[in-house]
Image (cartoon, helix red, strand yellow):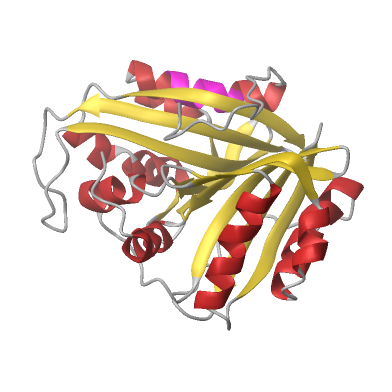
Amino acid sequence: MIGAESGGYRETIESTPNCDVAKASFDTYNAGDWAGYQALQHPDVQWLEVQGRHFHGPSGVTEEIDNWRDAYPDASADITNLFDCGDDRVVIEWTLFGERRGMATGPGGREIPENMRVHCADLMQLKDRRVYSGRTYYGLRTAQTVAAVQGGVTAVDAELPDLGQYRIRMDETPDALVAKASFDTYNARDWDGYRALQHPAVEAHEVEGRMFAGVEGVIDEIDTFAEAYPDVEASITNLVDCGRGRVIIEWTLTGRPGRVRACDLMQIIEGKVHRVRTYYGVASALAVIGVQGLGQGG
């Protein structure tokens, strides 16, 4: 369960050659098999924790998990959703949980929570059946734990580092165009057009945050936000149709209260937006928590 679960959000654990590589990376982590974990990485692997740290090479990617192992040596990661997008891309939603048995403060001096449960989404790209590039986005309260355990959080307005090999697409399939239209109508403040794109049973969920149900519930929320921040505009930076009614959208919101980087996992039925889960970059999540007044979470 991710915060408050959106009923009807479709989850699966697919078994394809690339999905099996992704799953094996979690299996080797849980087993503490670091040699096996490194063997799954491409020699030129690059990974970005969005608005956090970035890593190069198998040893660098293994370093990514060092602080987590130091604080939570018995932590275990569960995959909750794993699907293949084709084009050597997979998407993984996952939960890491554990009890602190190691260091009590992180690199920035923040106290590390005693009990940890974090929710994340990985956008993974593979080459030659090995992990080649990717990005991790986070649930809202997860960002607080990430900042405590490993530090390295960038300024909210900082540009993302150019990792070069992370491939961007802007698909124009029917489902991708529905997703794009939802952003276009938002930017135009065309609420009738936005409303027409929503399934009657639509649910939108900020992971570990708020959830909005029904067309009017979703419209009321974005209308309220647009009135509070009339100058904001959302731009899509990566739009991938994964098939079977699933679309991945990386996007940036600019204007007051600052730049927000996020990723939507969108599910579409009969040409309408049915379910959306939103994950954030670390700095963006911390900023959203401040705006929404959410309390400290584990």
Q: Is residue 22 magenta?
A: yes
Query: At 57% from the left edge and 81% from the top edge, which residue is drawn?
Result: 230
Question: Whole-percent x and y of residue 292?
Answer: 37, 60
Decide whether the magenta segment is chiefly helix, strand or loop: helix
**Quick one: 38 or 92, which is closer to the camera?**
92
Is residue 243 within the magenta segment?
A: no
Task: Answer left or right for 167 relative to 232.
Answer: right
Tell me which residue sits at (58%, 78%) in the image: 232
**Residue plotted at (36% across, 72% down):** 155
Toward the bottom, the furthest residue is: 231
- Left/right placement of residue 219 relative to residue 161 reads right
Closer to us: 234 or 243: 234
Q: Quadrant of the N terminus?
A: top left
- Whether residue 9 is visible, yes or no, is yes
Rendered image quadrant of residue 87: top right
Q: Position of residue 83 (x, y in %)?
A: 67, 29
Residue located at (42% from left, 37% from top): 119
x then y, percent, for residue 59:
38, 42
Give the magenta-colored segment's residue range.
Answer: 21-27
Q: Nearer the viewer, residue 130 or 198?
A: 198
Q: Is residue 212 above or below residue 238?
A: above
Q: Position of residue 137 (x, y in %)?
A: 48, 49
Q: Quadrant of the C terminus?
A: top left
Q: Where is residue 4, by image quadrant?
A: top left
